[in-house]
Amino acid sequence: MAKKDSFETYKSIVFNAARDGKLSRLKVFLDQRPKEEVKSLVSAVTSGTTPLLMACRHGHHDVVKYFIEECKVDFEQVGSVTFDGETIDGAPPLWCAAAAGHLNIVQSLILHGAQVNHTTYTSSTPLRAACFDGHFEIVRYLVDHDANIELANRHGHTCLMISCYKGHLRIARYLLQLGADVNRKSVKGNTALHDCAESGSLEIMKLLLKYKAKMDVDAYGMTPLMAAAVAGHTSIVEYLVSRPESTRQERIDAFELVGATFVDKKRDMLGALKFWNLAMDERYKEKANVIAKPQQNILVPAYEFTMEAGSKEDLDDIICDPDKMRMQALLIRERILGPAHPDTSYYIRYRGAVYADSGNFERCILLWMYALDMQQKALEALNPMTQSSLLSFAELFAYMQSERHGEKVSNFLTNEDVMEVFTKGVREIERGYEQLQIAPLTEKDTSNFNRGLLILMHLICLVAKIKSQQTETIPMKRTLYRLLRLCPRGAKGYTLLHLACDKETSSVGRYPVCSFPSLDVVQLLVECGASVNAVDTERNTPLHIAAMNSNNNTDKIIQYLITQGAHFDSCNAEHKTPPDLVRSSCDISWINYVTLQCLAARAIVKYNIDYRGHIPKKLEALIELH
């Protein structure tokens, strides 16, 4: 067995034994090995994590002690661990043990010198991890060993905030007794009161107020009362509206929002009517100071041109019509929360999805289009919520285009709808590109931009499928040409044509949309001006990517790219040509596509001839490609 294969096998043995708590097996395997080999094995990373992290995650205290005391493992080495389906990157062993609730392991790590405030990549501390799942004894132990209760994660959420959000009264009380800042704000402006209001714990709410918590607003202008109303926690709403600091307008808004939540979240029309009547009572209880609803100047087609109820009589008229009640909820939420609040567009999209499930695709598309317009006007470019809307459209259109759903479903899909969403998707990328020109993108922005391109690729694929059905394709191609002129680049420096040739582009959401590599998309992009010889960060052309993703269905893509001027003998950063990378039996006679230009370029490269400045720039680029 080769040395590399041996190490991989040994690494797997150590990892599995650590995960399963097989101390005796570890001792038999490691005790007789050289110290350097043992250190390499216990520090080796498997699927992003280490043996020590696995032992901490699964509570194998004896294995942890053995690694620390006998194997001299680095107990600050970070890795990835999974909790409740979520992967945490850059987690140190102490964080992992605290999150999993293993006090004895936490104690061992601290006693051996582990850094008590060592954070994950998202700046989460071991103390915050313990607060999240309510491990009180671990919280107390970490605090006793100098854990900083005010260290917040990258979102600005403190240990007190997460304790309140998760409803851990005992931990919240303990942190407050230690002097935790009760009015500290997160990046988005919410306080512990907001988190408590969202979670629904009235006891913690009263405790926070006892410690002088202030009724402040977050970045969306939401008070804790409003947050409780949106979440539908009636006990907190009723408690807060009874307090002297609540104004009439706040009480009205809270009652109306609770009613909207009862409609959309609880499907309780009578409950909604009760709270909307309470709001009406507040509006009209002072005859000299009536707070009437704002005049509704615009009737929204997506809401079926519904008017908001302005009196109790109006409410009585709609209680027997569930659809009108649902439109009331959407109108109320949009008026009070505004278009930028996540819940406004979320519930519009939710209502559209319900209509789609019942076969009413026209209402769904109308509502979703309204929500997408709202998001593009109110939110920053490439906002995850806007991207989610575009992806939902792609998934819906793919479902409706699918042959297995028959003609009945596809009849509801119009080319105009697909083109409109495609155009909005292109506009979103343009907005992101405009933002790039103002300031360099952060890592998060770059990730959003790449995801936006992936979603757009699926929209382009859907457009390509309807292209043959349209007699007029000039507007569609003009839009795509406008996008290609920006030369947008995704991860690894991929152009749109690279993405069209990559099978990884298929994976964009939870549900299947389009399959890549796609000949239809490749042809459409090339027709609209995509460069067949553009290179990514590894100097791969689209032809390289197609070759690496080759199967029985990609021969046509490879052949098409070559006929459109792609150089099959171009070299990437590893000096590989597309024929070197083909993984299937590709039925292409490469020799038929050799040109005199290519032979000359390869000769210049081979013999290291100085050509710069002696030939036109266009020819210099050709030589560099080879």
Image (cartoon, rainbow, N blue to C red):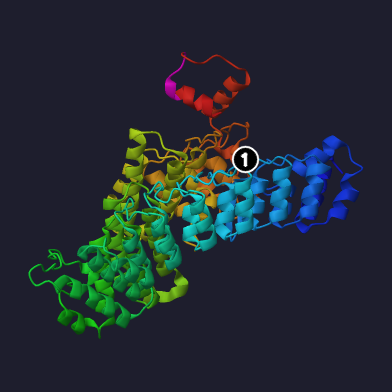
Q: What is the x, y in percent for residue 325?
A: 26, 77
| Residue 616 magenta-highlighted | yes
Residue at image x 59%, y 22%?
Answer: 605
Circle 1 packing at 10 Å, graded few (<14), some (14-19), many (20+), is: some
The picture places residue 172, in percent across and down from the top left corner, at 50, 57
508 over 320 or under it: above or below: above
Q: Residue at x 14, y 67 (%)?
A: 291
Quarter holding the C terminus is top right
The dominant secondary structure in magenta is: loop
Choose between 569 and 500: the one closer to the eye.
500
Secondary structure under tag 1 reads helix
Name the foreground residue: 484 vs 261. Answer: 261
Query: Which quadrant would the N terminus be assigned to in this image?
Result: top right
Amino acid type at image mark 1: Pro
Q: Is residue 89 above or below residue 398?
A: above
Name the residue located 49 percent from the left edge and 43 percent from the top edge: 498
Observer-nearest of 73 and 507: 73
Residue marked by disc 1: 579
Magenta region, residue range: 614-618
Q: Is residue 557 magenta?
A: no
Question: Residue 611, percent across and down?
Answer: 52, 16
* Drawn side of residue 407 relative to residue 558, left or right: left
**Residue furthest bottom as drawn:** 320
| Picture layout, residue 357 above or below residue 216 | below
